[in-house]
Amino acid sequence: MSKVALITGGASGIGFEFAKIVAADGYNLLLIDINENGLKEACDSLTSEFEVEANYLFEDLSKTQAAANVHSFINQKNLAIHIIFNNAGFGNFGYFKETSLEKDNAMLNVHMITTTNLIKLLLPQMIKRGEGRILNNASVAAFVPGPLMSTYHASKAYLLYLSLALNDELKGTGITVTTLCPGMTRTGFQKANGNETPDIKFNIATAKDVAKYGYKMMMKGKPVAIPGFFNKLSAFLPRFLPRKRVASMVGNIQRKNHAKRMTN
């Protein structure tokens, strides 16, 4: 049975770059995204460039039954999932008292509930085969409290700690869990979360570079992958400063971003 890489948010950005990397390594693909036209285009592009089979599933991962729907599709297609890229995600920028409750709930479902459920449903077969890789795409936001993106940072911290715990639990099974923690990356993320022109002008990576680094670290079995020197520095900052101070520093940057957005 051919090995398959499952990639959520696979129609564009980092997810699509992951798809190209694993396709080049001979993995068949299952791309999942809420962008149905983008999925079709991505699969057409990948199958024309690489000799792989590419399945896709249009699915809103913020819905309660999303993981069960994905699992059912996998069983119907008799796919052997060897790599899981839990890559899909988005943010919600603004003061907590003002941001959309519906958007917050959708984001928390995508980042935490659906990701957890997908791993829970797919892990038994991985363990039975004695091999597998899981990559959860978090963020350097996982390491610090984030005023004006409070729920986003908190959800990414959940991913980080879930991944570290599972990676420890799975010792000796042939399965590793890696948390990818990129910083600012050139994707559609900033536009989607309402902060299209953040007050950061350096240390912005490309989706391709982030995916290459994440894949390399995942295949090495590294538990945490932080691309870039400044991102590593950001992740270590809370070890040396009080959390309250770190929250204040992040909040000052975000308030500037918010004020700039209000004047545009």
Image (cartoon, helix red, strand yellow):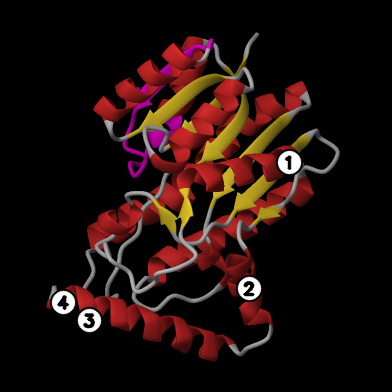
Mark 3: which amino acid?
Ala
Residue range corresponding to the magenta coloring: 51-68
Q: In front: 38, or 57?
A: 38
Q: In front: 87, or 155?
A: 87
Residues at circles 1 and 3 in contact by the CB criterion of under 8 Å: no
Q: Helix, strand or loop at disc 2?
A: helix
Q: Residues within 10 Å of mark 3 (few under 14, many from 20)?
A: few
Q: Residues within 10 Å of mark 1 (few under 14, many from 20)?
A: many
Q: Residues within 10 Å of mark 2 (few under 14, many from 20)?
A: few
Say which residue appears at 52% left-offset and 90% top-offset: 244
Residue 255 vertical position relative to residue 115 in the rendered view, above or below = below
| Residue 262's disc number | 4
Inter-mark Cα distance, 4 to 2: 30 Å
Q: Which residue is denoted by mark 3 in the rendering? A: 259
Inter-mark Cα distance, 3 to 2: 26 Å
Inter-mark Cα distance, 1 to 3: 42 Å
Mark 2: which amino acid?
Leu
Q: Per the image, is 101 magenta?
A: no
- Relative side of 193 to 233, left or right: left
Answer with the quarter of the image where residue 93 lies.
bottom left
Q: Is residue 96 visible?
A: yes
| Residue 68's disc number | none
Q: Per the image, is 67 magenta?
A: yes
Say which residue appears at 23% left-offset and 69% top-offset: 99
Inter-mark Cα distance, 4 to 3: 5 Å
